[in-house]
Image (tube, helix red, strand yellow):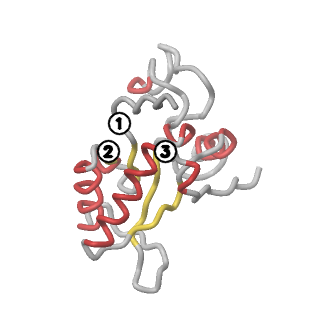
Amino acid sequence: MSEPLKDRDLAKLHPAFRLKVERLLETLQRAGVPFKLDEGFRSRERQGWLYASGRTRPGNILTQKDGAPGVWQKTHEVASERGKPRRSRHQSGLAADVYPLKSDGRVWIPAASHEAWVLLATAARSLGLRAGRDWGDSPHVEYQGALPKKEKG
């Protein structure tokens, strides 16, 4: 299977999360370190393709989430995932991967220790988002807490 395309459409993110991601990108731009959404919503096919890396196809292990419904069984090989959802928050439009941009507008992937990632994590936390840097996934941010209830019209 060839690599399924990344989805970079902010409109496909959950509305409450999209607002926070837009504010995050604006905050980073004002700080002089522009970032860009590299991947937001993720299909089950793309999640499965990422999960296969380092398992059934060559490469490093990229994720512990295979994208299937349900939770990992209590005997799952990765103890920290036992009883946790098999779906990524990307699949619900509640996670995004963002990267800093070079002056020419191209994505730049600095070392994990680079201050750009510290800035991203700090700005994300200030908006109530979880920063993937806390568990070794520097470009990742995700919604945390309860989602707002829909207003009755």
Q: Quadrant of residue 17?
A: top left
How far apart, in angstroms, are the residues tagged by discs 2 and 1?
6 Å
Residue 15, compared with residue 109, is above or below; it is above
Q: Is residue 1 left or right of residue 133?
A: right
Give yes or no for contact between labels 2 and 1 (Cβ–Cβ under 8 Å).
yes
SS label for mark 3: helix
Q: Amino acid at mark 1?
A: Gln
Q: Residue at x 53, y 47 (%)?
A: 13
What amino acid type is highlighted by mark number 3?
Pro
Using the rendered view, name the quadrant where residue 56 is placed.
top right
Q: Earlier in the sequence, mark 1 or mark 3?
A: 3
Q: Residue furthest top?
A: 74
Horizontal side of 81 relative to 51 (left or right) equals: left
Label 3 to label 2, Cα distance in Å?
Answer: 14 Å
Distance between the alpha carbons at the discs numbered 1 and 3: 14 Å
* Towards the viewer: 122 or 49: 122
Sequence-wise, which precedes: disc 3 or disc 2?
3
86 and 10: which one is in front?
10
Location of mark 3 (residue): 15
Type of the residue with mark 2? Leu
Find residue 144 and name its label: 1
Tell me where residue 102 appears, x and y as whole percent. Answer: 41, 80
Residue at image coords 40%, 54%: 21
Q: Residue at x 69, y 42 (%)?
A: 45
> Can residue 55 be seen in the rendering of this structure?
yes
Q: Position of residue 32 (x, y in %)?
A: 28, 76
- Say which of 147 and 48 sits in front: 147
- Would you name the residue on which mark 2 appears? 129
- Residue 123: x and y in percent read 25, 57
Label 3 with label 2: CB-CB less than 8 Å: no
Comparing marks 3 and 2, which lies closer to the viewer?
Answer: 3
- Helix, strand or loop under label 1: loop
